[in-house]
Amino acid sequence: MDLNLKKMTQLETEIVNFFKSSTGLRDIGLDTNIGNEKYKIFDLDAENLMETFFKKYNIDYSNFTVSKYFIYPNYSWRSLVFIRLFFDKVEYPLKPALTIKHLIEVAMRKKWFDPS
């Protein structure tokens, strides 16, 4: 077992494991920003992931906006062709961090609140 998981509470461990199993990612810890573009959790995948999380932990998420924390790529054919022809990498706008630590706090309060 990971040493960091030994120091976590049961709820913390459960939530880290939820995100590991839901995303297939193994390098998730308390400070992981799951909205980071490197994890490639975009649009509908992000919506499904967060809705599943909120429902599993019975959280009021009426004030949560997925697009504030996760990337929604431009899927227009013009954008895709132009970007593929002239750029090596798509640059996405910087989004506020959505860490596992914050999501644990949300689960404890049972209500969504923005990270400070």
Image (cartoon, rainbow, N blue to C red):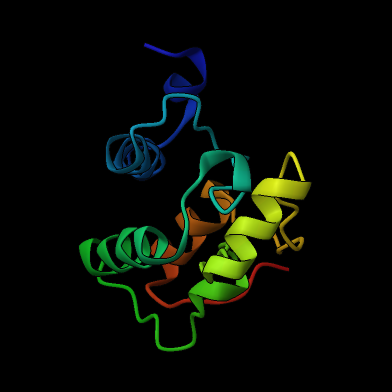
x 69%, y 54%: residue: 83
x 78%, y 48%: residue: 86
Above-or-below relation of 12 to 8: below
Q: Give the image location of residue 106, x and y in percent.
A: 47, 66
Q: Which of 87 and 27 is in front in this view?
A: 87
Above-or-below relation of 6 to 52: above
Q: Give the image location of residue 15, x and y in percent.
A: 36, 45
Q: Give the image location of residue 58, x and y in percent.
A: 25, 71
Q: Which of 48 and 55 is in front in this view?
A: 48
How many labels were placed on the picture? 0
Q: Nearer the viewer, residue 83 or 4?
A: 83
From the viewer's perspective, tell me whether residue 63 is left or right of residue 24.
right
Q: Give the image location of residue 48, x and y in percent.
A: 30, 64
Q: Which of 12 and 73 is in front in this view?
A: 73
Above-or-below relation of 89 to 60: above
From the viewer's perspective, tell me whether residue 75 is left or right of residue 88.
left
Above-or-below relation of 6 to 21: above
Q: Residue placed farthest to the bottom in the image? A: 62
From the viewer's perspective, tell me whether residue 76 is left or right of residue 53.
right
x 42%, y 24%: residue: 26
Which quadrant is home to the N terminus?
A: top left
